Image (cartoon, grey):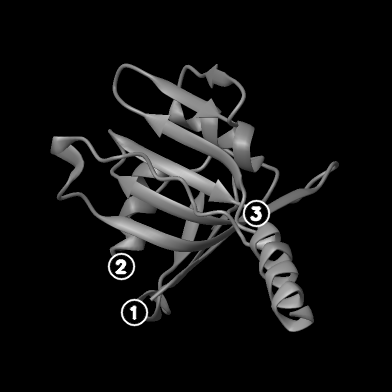
Amino acid sequence: MRTWWFALLMGILLAGCATPGRFTSPMRGEQVNRPEWQGRISVQVQGNTPSSMSASFSLRGDAKNGELDLYSPLGTTLGALQWTPQMVQFSDGSKHQFFNSLAELTEHTTGAALPVDALFGWLQGRDVQATGWLADLSAASIGSVTARRVSPAPEVMLRIKLDH
């Protein structure tokens, strides 16, 4: 009897520590055939006040219509970015913030305006040019992309490692 209670107590404790499932919004009809990537992203901003962010991510869509969910190492949702031609927003679960552009949104969430058009190309292994950015796609075949913004200052380093 004592073993049964111990097993029940351990089951309850382990269930309480379980990592919650990641939230992904259902895809609308036009998004079903769009690519999806998952992995880790890191953005380091140099300069007078250096900053960095690192998170797991799930990216769906393209540069015109997409969603990017960011997760902590424990799997909790840090934020959800969504964009369409009509709307650009960030949601942290309790509030929604709207932005004028995708560059503004990525700067708010990562510390630097990211070249989203080029980013989708880089993830597909294409050497897409972005003003001020130098991409290294030499490891793209194994799911690793790095890019460095050299202008305008401050310098920014973007690293993406895709899950397989």
Observer-nearest of 118 and 15: 15
Query: Residue 30 appears at what percent x and percent y?
Result: 14, 37
Q: Are marks 2 and 1 in contact (CB under 8 Å)?
A: yes
**Which numbered circle lies on residue 72?**
3
Residue 44 can be seen, yes or no: no
Q: Residue at x 47, y 35 (%)?
A: 81
**Mark 2: secondary structure:** loop
Could you tell me which residue is drawn at 62 percent across and 24 percent down? 94
Residue at far right of view: 48
Secondary structure under badge 1?
helix
Q: Which residue is mark 1?
A: 141
User: Which picture quadrant has residue 108?
Assistant: top right
Q: Residues within 10 Å of mark 2 (few under 14, many from 20)?
A: some
Query: Residue visible at 51% across and 19% down?
Result: 99
Q: Quadrant of residue 67?
A: top left
What amino acid is labelled 2 in the image?
A: Gly
**Horizontal relation, residue 141 to residue 101: left or right:** left
Return the disc, 3 or 1, that comes first in the chain's sequence.
3
Cα–Cα span, label 3 and label 2? 26 Å
Asked if one can make out residue 130 in the rendered structure from this viewpoint, the answer is yes
Furthest residue toward front? 1
Residue under numbered circle 2: 125
Horizontal side of residue 77 vs 127, given as left or right: right
Quadrant holding the C terminus = bottom left
State the image coordinates of residue 26 (x, y, percent, origin top left).
29, 40
